[in-house]
Image (cartoon, rainbow, N blue to C red):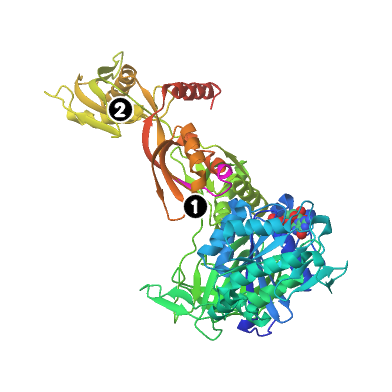
Amino acid sequence: MTTKSVDLAHLRSVVLAGHAGAGKTTLAESLLFRAGAIPRLGRVDDGTSTLDYEPEEQKRRESLSLAVATFDDDGTIVTMVDTPGYPDFVAETVSAVAACDGVLFVVDAGGGVGAGLETAVELGRSSRMAACFFINKADRENADPTAALDALRATFGNKVAPLHLAIGAAETFSGYVDLVHRRAWQWDGKAEVEIPIPAELAAELDRRRDQLLEAAAEADDDVLAKYLDGAEVSDPELEACLRKGVKESILAPVLVGSAVRGIGLRALLDAFIRYLPSPADEPATQAHEPKSGDPIAVPADPAGPLLVRAFKTAADPFVGRLTYLRVFSGTLHAQGHVWNATRGEEERIGQLLLVHGKDQEPVAELKAGQIGAVAKLTVTATGDTLSSRELPLELDPLRFPNPSLAVAIEPQTKADLDKMGAALARMLEEEPSARVDRSATGEQLLVAMGEAHIAVIGERLKRKFGAAIVTHTPTVPYRETIRGKTQVEGKYKKQTGGHGMFGHVWIELEANPGGGIEFAERVVGGSVPKNYFPGIEKGVRDAAAEGVLAGYPLSDFKATLYDGSFHPVDSNELSFKIAASMALKKGVMECRPALLEPIMLVSVTVPERYMGDVNRDLNTRRGRVLGMDTDGTNQVVKAHVPQAELFSYATELRSLTHGRGTFTAEVDSYEEVPAFLAEKVISAHRREAEAGH
Ligand code: GDP
């Protein structure tokens, strides 16, 4: 068990973010290997990575959950949180950002600026995180690290400042020039060795160093004055500016290398240590008193009040729940009690763990600034705050993206049915961006971020909890209605032998748009005795449960009982109920029945440049755009769209907007289905009925 004390200034935590496939996991793995934290270099490509260890990740060769790896780099404890780059799993990045002090955006030297990177940068920006970039895969075929640097500056602005200049590219990539110290390093097959600065890079070095100085000088007025005067800025001055500039998000340095070949990694670790803030450099964490909401600023201090965020829950069928924690202040002890301020309940802490990818190391305590995990918490959910009972403190909740793709789920077999409820509940503990719901047609829905997310949840349900599910497109909760008005008679008579039956009604039937089912009576002279009214109403409502067109519930009509007759002996409630049902069925046929469909109020949020495409697409979905607005950064389009046209929208909006668009949808109203579509729905329903469904 590790008991070595850690000093705040020697802690670093960094999220690895960026587009899927940029090489984040490979980079984390290589950094761990470099720092001597793992004896063998695992590879994403053959499924031996320390960080992508779940079977679903190995199968897909990509990260699906965040993974934490803490290692000691010559006295500095670095915690990396590797995240998936795919938009379906962005909740993992939200969690990671909440736990770390800095973020490293990994960029593919041959791939330009991907949407995953843009989303990640936006997240980092909104949380005002210290950030740096690593242009990875500089060795890859067609890699152009210089073009990648220019693309970053074009997308994110001049605060993106080069720290390195690549020597060569693709097959000829062999090292880098350190622009701060004007020194060149080359890979000699075993290690990086210093070489003279290649002559052909002299001019480029001056130009790029100027970009670096220009960005860095913004952090310090004196240095800025010197720079503008053309005076020499010393290395220590430049380093100090870089440190301050990164901490205050004035600039984001860019390094270059190859995770696979191990080039530029020592420099990257040095940059973490030199430029990324330690918890001691961070401003006090903003918390509040749970009851009053009074704000309390809590500085990072191992001796201060306890303030811990649970940022991720992993469901493990054997170990139980594993909760990842970041301690912001105070010291969390193993085998103790804490106060879950979010729930207002006590929580018992068992064994504390430092996490090294798939391996864990028991520790006696986790201090301010550290990231670790604890098994088997009972009340704590993702996002909750743990503190002490004496001084309850709460952090603002984490904001996870809303899921928008719904599929209907069913257990594969009877055995799965028994396990499904509990399995889903446990599964959702680790999925803050997924939920289960019940549809208007009674189907169980799984609502998640996208198709990949749903597939992965399904696979994990089966592997972890032995509950296999099948998914299908949810059925549209169509309704039927009437459009005209009629008066209709219903008579039920059975008077042959024994006790007879007699019910006789006249009902007026009319459309009642948006008003549901209404029942009234205006019987005069006791032609139908009052005590039969409830039976008649029931007969009407029962008959409305299945419409005449395709068996969907009949709605939005008014039925008024106005006349009828009875028999003193044979009449009873049942006879009148049957008579009323008969009247309704007959009346509906006379009132031009119609099919209704649910119309959703959809709100789509996208960057301005995708607006044209999004509007065109909404049109093809029979959508009606109601208006457009801005939320400061993005455009928000509001539209009415039939639910039947929305099932694949989550997927298609994503491909249309390169992952940048999001939407919400809620049922707004019901409208008549256009005739050409109504016919299709009705005949499909008939076919199903004939097939015996
Ligand atoms: P992630 O999705 O960002 O975590 O990316 P991975 O680490 O899974 O890497 C995606 C692919 O890129 C894998 O096939 C890696 O072997 C490959 N890769 C990663 N880093 C490098 C690199 O520096 N050079 C080359 N040539 N390939 C790399």
Q: Amino acid at mark 1?
A: Asn
Query: Is the residue marked by circle 1 packed among few (<14), some (14-19), or many (20+) residues within 10 Å?
Result: some
Circle 2 is placed at which residue position? 540
Tell me the distance, in whole angstroms, between the alpha carbons under discs 1 and 2. Answer: 41 Å
- Mark 2 and mark 1 in contact (Cβ < 8 Å)? no
Residue 27 image position (x, y, % from top left): 73, 63
Q: Residue furthest left?
A: 525
Residue 541 image position (x, y, % from top left): 32, 30
Residue 406 image position (x, y, % from top left): 52, 43
Q: Is disc 2 placed on a helix, strand or loop?
A: helix
Judge whether 577 appears above or below 199 on screen: above
Q: Nearer the viewer, residue 123 or 643?
A: 123
* Left-right relation of 544 to 166: left
* Left-right relation of 38 to 605: right
Q: Residue furthest right?
A: 189
Q: Residue at x 56, y 79 (%)?
A: 281
Q: Which mark is residue 70?
A: none
Q: Nearer the viewer, residue 481 or 163?
A: 163
Q: Amino acid at mark 2?
A: Val
Q: Which mark is residue 402?
A: 1
Q: Residue at x 21, y 30 (%)?
A: 520
Residue 536, located in which quarter of the rendered image? Answer: top left
Dot in front, 1 or 2 = 1
First-in-chain label (1 vs 2): 1
Which contiguous range is marked in magenta? 654-664
- In terms of image quarters, where does ligand 1 lie? bottom right
Residue 658 located within the stretch drawn in magenta: yes
